[in-house]
Image: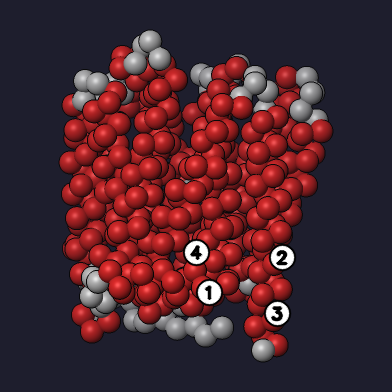
Amino acid sequence: MTQTTRHLPIARAEFIALMAMMFATIAFSIDAMLPAMPDIATQLTPLEPTRATLIITSFVLGMGIGTFFTGPLSDAFGRRRIMFLGAGLYIASAAVAWASQSLELMLIARVFQGIGASGPRVVCIAIVRDLFSGREMARILSIVMIIFTIVPAFAPAMGVVIIHFTGWRSIFLAFMIFSLISAVWLGLRLPETLPETNRRPLKIALIVDAVRQMLQHPVVRISIFVQTLSMAMLFSLLMLIQPIYQFVFDKLETFPFWFGAIALSSALSSFLNAMLVVRFGMRRLITIGLAMQIGLSTLVLMTSGSAAGQGFAVFAIWQAFVFFQAGLSIGNLNAIAMEPMGHIAGMAASVIGAISTVLAAVIASPVGLLFDGTIRPLVGTILVLALLAFLLMMYMARVEARAQRA
């Protein structure tokens, strides 16, 4: 596998921090909303409080839709322009959500906020691919993920603080400030990374051809499916984590602090991945993480009938490993899928993000309906998803072995 690195126009540490902040827009937009769900339900949908969870899924839907378009747009017009366009839409939509007096209007605003957030998400990955390739690209993405995972660790607690002092609507003001800072930072410090000579005209035929190239490449195709399953694990956990803390373990008041402390485990996995990926390779680390997830989920299902105290300890360890395994997998899966697609990096980032996000949301959506007052539906779902992902990674190894022999 060849590895190249173009000259970085800014210091590597600053580049990584900027990419992490851009990518963290997604996590902040989702996780900071979790503590606001009860207040939103009380004020905007008191007769049907479960509809408040649509605040999360509507954002994910918009993100999945927007992700498909931001890549080809950035390939045609450059990374910076699309980043600024996405940030502008994100900020405007957050302002509408802040002022909304009905849940319906807020959901529409959240869809457009998700579309806007897809700009930083896709542009971040495309910029990294513009400047790096091979295992060095995986290393950079892993370091970005380390910083990125700090945001979901602290976002719920930040949401609690904002709600306590200024009310839940101020969370949308925090979104606006966060996006404005990242856009100004990029505008002032990072030049365009895609030269005009390397841009692809925005033509339907070229977009269709790019999608065909990706879906015909077996390793890229498998990587997308495995990333879909990995993201479905996270979405399933996010959908049920608060009800589990509230109704199974009676820890709703301390939920943001447990969530934050446990979410930091994914930062540890990204740190380990950054150290190990060059030596052992991306596919092997992903496969090991999935195998461990299968074993631990099986153990948790077997012990889920324990007393409440012991049950929570086991569940907390398992929850930490779900985050740990995500940190070990998603960055590597992006790198594997992007490696053969350097000539269409923006489009590739869009297709990978759009397919994996939308399908993961579809897979995870019914999980909330399975909640029966225990942790079994969630753990069982993640066990099945991890098993499918593991089998696909084993198949990827066979595909790569055949390619090497050919």
Q: Earlier in the sequence, mark 3 or mark 1?
A: 1
Q: Give the numbered dot on residue 394.
A: 2
Q: Give the numbered dot on residue 401.
A: 3
Q: Earlier in the sequence, mark 3 or mark 2?
A: 2
* Residue shown at the point (23%, 61%) measured from the top left: 82
* Residue shown at the point (58%, 64%) measured from the top left: 222
- Residue 220: x and y in percent read 53, 69
Side of 394 relative to 134 (left or right) = right
Q: Which residue is mark 4?
A: 334
The answer to whether mark 3 and mark 2 are in CB contact below 8 A is: no
Q: Secondary structure at mark 2?
A: helix
**Amino acid identity at mark 1:** His
Measure the alpha-carbon separation of dots 3 and 1: 15 Å
Measure the alpha-carbon separation of dots 3 and 2: 11 Å
Q: Secondary structure at mark 3?
A: helix
* The C terminus - image quarter: bottom right
Measure the alpha-carbon separation of dots 3 and 4: 20 Å
**Amino acid identity at mark 2:** Met
* The N terminus - image quarter: bottom right
* Residue shown at the point (44%, 20%) measured from the top left: 50
Measure the alpha-carbon separation of dots 4 and 2: 17 Å
In the figure, residue 240 lies in which quadrant? top right
**Amino acid identity at mark 3:** Ala
Measure the alpha-carbon separation of dots 4 and 1: 14 Å
Relative to 129, residue 316 above or below: above
**Amino acid identity at mark 4:** Asn
Q: Which residue is mark 1?
A: 217
Q: Earlier in the sequence, mark 4 or mark 2?
A: 4
Q: Earlier in the sequence, mark 3 or mark 4?
A: 4
Q: Secondary structure at mark 4?
A: helix
